[in-house]
Amino acid sequence: MLQLEQQFDLHTDVESEIFRKEASACRVTEYTGAVDARILNIESDGGILYSWKGATGTTRIGKYNSNTKQNKLLYSFDKQVCVSSCSLNMEETLLAVSLAQNAPAEERLRPMSKCLTLLIEIHPINNTKVLKAVDCRVKVQFLHQDTTRKSVLESHLLLLTEDGYVDLYHVLLTKQEGYRVVMANPERLAKTVERIVEDLSWVQWDGHTQRLYFLTRKDKFIMRCIQFYSQHSCETVMELPLDLPANAFPTVKFVSLGFDHYHVERPEEEPLRMIVFTNRIERSMCICYSQPLQDKQEVLYTVVLVHKDCSKMFKVSLGGEQPRQEVAHHHPLFIPMGYYMLVYLQGHFLHCINTRQEEKLCHSLFLSGPDVDLGLQCQAAEVTVLHSEEESCGRLLDLVSGKIHAAELSSAYLLQILRSETPSRCRSSSSSSSTVHPQHLAALHCLLVYMGNDPSLELQIIEWLCDNVIAFESFDQIQEFILASLYRISYNKSVSLDKVLPYSSVFDMKDVPVCLLEIPGVLCSTELHIKAALKGKGFWTELQWNTERTKYLDAVPNPRYRTSHIKADWDKLRSERKASSHMNHIEENTKKVLSMVDTWCLDKKLVPLFQEEDHQQRVLIGLTVDKLREHLNRHLPRLGKKKTDSLVVCYVAKLLELIRHMLESVWLKYELGPRALCLKQQASSAEWSVFHFMFRILEATRGLCLPFPPGFHTLVAVFAVRCLPHHIFLQYIDHGFLQLTETFLSRLMTDLDNSDANERLKFSILKRLPEPMEQRIYHMWDHPVSSASISREYVRSLLEKHDKNKGFAFTGRDKSSFRPEFLPLSYLAKVLSDIEEQALNPFEEQENVDASFVEETALKQTLILLGFEEK
C-alpha cells in the first residue's frame, strides 16, 4: 500500500562512522566492540541525535546532519550512563541531557534520584549545570531560535515531566574570548524558570511547528495547544473539550523511546493512545485516538476533524477468537498522508480516511483481512510516525533497525485494486458485488484527486475505463472520472471549493446504494459541532477561517453545486433562435470558454473536435458557466468577481478538454486514423470499441447535464451509422440517444451513394428532422426527390409573393404524392419567368433555382412517375 524510500539508516550512516572513530581512538585497524547506537531525538532542522557506548567504558553523544550527511561528536561521558532524552540548541553551544539513574548494589542504601537533568556547555566543553534531580522521567527540548538574528545570546529549554507539569527555562548566554559561548550567571538559572503547564494528563511536542499539545482534566478532558513564536513569546491558541473515558490517562508515563517529532506520552498500560497532526497545505487539524475494547473483539478509534467541525468514531469488529490480553494491546497506527489519514492494524485492517470529503464512507478506502499490508519491513508496533505539516507525504521510523523511510501511497497498489474483479472483501459480507464497487470508488478518487497530477497515471485510468465500459451497479465510473478530475484541477486553484464544487455523482443520487453508505463490520458515528475555540496567527488564522466556512456551508441548503439542476433552463434556451440580451450573454460565456480551449490544444488535432458550430452545445456551455458563477458568488463571495469568473471559465474549458483527452487516448489505444471517419465502409472491431466508449461518455455526461465539445455529437453519429444496423441507428435517434448535427447530415447526404439501403436511410432521417433543418439538408442531397422538394418550395414562395399582388391563391404543398397540383407546366414556367424578371433579386432565398430548374425537375419527376425513367 505504501511506497517507501529510505532516507536514513542508523547502521550505514552512523555506526560505520562510529566504528572508524573508535578504531582511531583505540589505535587499532578495526574496532570490533559493541557500540549499542541509539537514536535519542530528531530536531526541527532534521538533525538526528544519537548515543553509543565508547571503547573505554564511556558514553558518547553525536549528531547526524541530514543535509550534509556528516556526523559530529557533541559530548562524551567518562562512564556508562543511560541517556533517556537529549536536545541541542540551534547554535550547537548547549546540550540538554536527561539521564536515567540506576544505583549500583553497594550504593542502594543511599538516597538517589531516578532522573538527572543536565545542561552542558559544549562550545567548547566547559560547565555542566544540574537542572533537576527527581524521581520521575524528564523530557528535554530546546525551542527554535530566531534564525534571522545574527547573534543569539539566549536559548529556551522545555522540561516535560511525568509528574504532570512543563517548565520553560530561559538561558542567557555570553561570549568569552571571542569564541567561547557560556551561560551567564548559571547560579541564577533556577530563577529564570517559568511553569507553563500544570496537572496535565497527556502531552505531545511538535518540533516542526513549535507547538505543545496537552490534556488537562477537571470535570472533563480539555485539549489545549500552546504556540511558541520565534521571539519566544507564546500563547494558548486552541481549546477543545474531548469526550474521553474517565480512566483514559490514569498516570503520565513517557514512552521508552520518545524521540520522534511528536513526543506522544501515554500511560504504561495504554488504555488509550492519542496523537495530533496538522497540515498547513490543507489548513487542517486531526486529533486521532484509539481504545481497544477488552470485553469484545473490537477496536474503537476516533478521528476529530477540527477543520470540518466534526468528529468520527469507528468501531471495527476484528473477528475470530483472540486472547483477551492480545486484544487489549490492539492499537492501530495513525499515518497522515496528505488529506488522508491511514489507520492500520497489522493483520486486521487498513482504513484510508478521506479528511477532505468525509461525508460519505464510500470515499474512504477500507480493506480488511490478514493479507492487508502497508509494505513495512517490520511490525507496525515498532514504527514511529514522523510528520511535518508542510509535507504531503509521511515519514516512518523503524525503532528496531533505526531506518527512516519517506512513505507515499502506492499508485500501483491502488491500480491493482481498480483492476481486480474482487478486491479484498469486507468481513461478514455475503455478496462480493456489495464490496467491490465501494473499494473501486475510493481507489479511483484517491488516484484521480490525490495523485492525479501524473499524466501517465491518468492514461492508465482511462485505459481501465475503456476495459470496463459498462457502468457499475452502484456508480458510474466515467462520471466519477470527470467530476473528480475537474475537482482536483479547480481545488488546486482555490482550496475554498472543497464543499462547493461537484466531487462525486454519489451526491446527486436520490437513492444511494446501501453498499456506498456502510462498511461491513464497521460502525461509524459522527458528532457535529465539536466546539473548538481557536485564535492566534498564521496557521491558526487559516484553520479558524476554514472551520467557520465549514460551519456556514453545513448550515445552508445545497452548498454543493449540482450540474443536473440546469436541465430545465437548458431545455428552454436550446429551442430559442431569436437574439436576446440573455442569449448574447450566454454566447459571450461560450466564446470565453472556447477561446481558452483553443489555446490549450493548438498542436493536438488528432480528434476532429472544436471545428464546427453546435448551437445546442454552445448554449449549454454558456449556461453552465452562468449557473456555476452564480453558485460561487452566492456561497463564496470572498473570492471576488475576477477570480470567480476565471475559475468557472477554466472549469468548463477543462471539462471540454478532458472529454477531448479521453477521446484522443482511446483513439491512440486502438490506433485509429482518418479512415475511421469514412462513412462508406463498415466499422472494424477497434472502431466499434471506440464507439462503445464514446457512447458511454455520451450517456454519463448527459446524465450530469454537462456540455460536450462542439463536434462530439457529429463524431458519435458518424461512428453510430458505421457500427449499427440502420434500423437500430434510427431507434437511437427516436429515443434521443443521438443528436443529429447539420455537419453529420451534410456528410451523410453527400458521402453515401443512393443505393436502395442508403436511400431508405436518408428518407427515414429526413422524416425525423424539424422542417427548417429538413429544407436545408434537402439542398445537400443530389436526388430527384430532393430536387422536387426544392422546386415545390421555390414555387410556393414565389407564388405567395405573386398572390399578394395579383390575388392568386396557392393551394399549398401536397405531401401525399409527388404529382404537382397547379397549372399546366408551360403556363407555370411562364408565370415564374415573369415574376423573376420583375424581382430585384429573384434568387435571394433559393440559390441555383429558377424557372428552368423547376421545369426540368418537373419533367424529370413526371417521367419517373410514368415509369419511363429510373431514379
Image: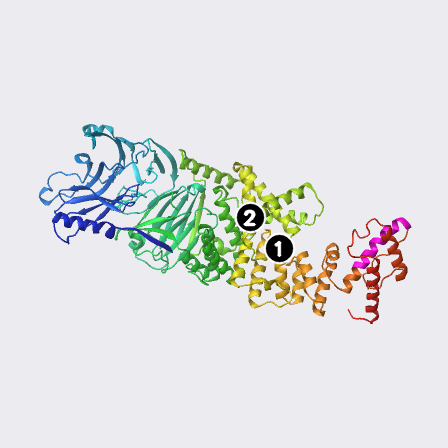
- Label 1 close to label 2 by CB (< 8 Å): no
Q: Position of residue 5 (x, y in %)?
A: 33, 53
At x 15%, y 50%, the residue is 23
- In the image, taking residue 372 as reference, residue 191 lies left or right, namely left
To which quarter of the image does residue 288 belong? top left
Say what secondary structure mark 2 lies in: helix
Residue extending farthest to the left is 106
Query: Label 1, label 2: how many angstroms apart (C-alpha)?
Result: 17 Å
Residue carrying label 1: 711
Q: Is residue 791 magenta?
A: yes
Instruction: Give the position of the C terminus as an image quadrant.
Output: bottom right
Labelled disc at residue 284: none
**Closest to the observer: 596 or 91?**
596
Instruction: Give the position of the N terminus as an image quadrant.
Output: bottom left
Label 2 crowd (10 A; few <14 / some 14-19 / many >=20): few
Label 1 crowd (10 A; few <14 / some 14-19 / many >=20): many
- In the image, taking residue 275 as reference, residue 833 lies left or right, namely right
At x 68%, y 65%, the residue is 752
Residue 573 appears anywhere in the view: yes
Disc 1 marks a residue whose amino acid type is Gly
- In the image, taking residue 127 as reference, residue 840 lies left or right, namely right
Residue extending farthest to the bottom is 868
Extent of the magenta region: 790-806
**Closest to the observer: 809 or 433?**
809
Residue carrying label 2: 599
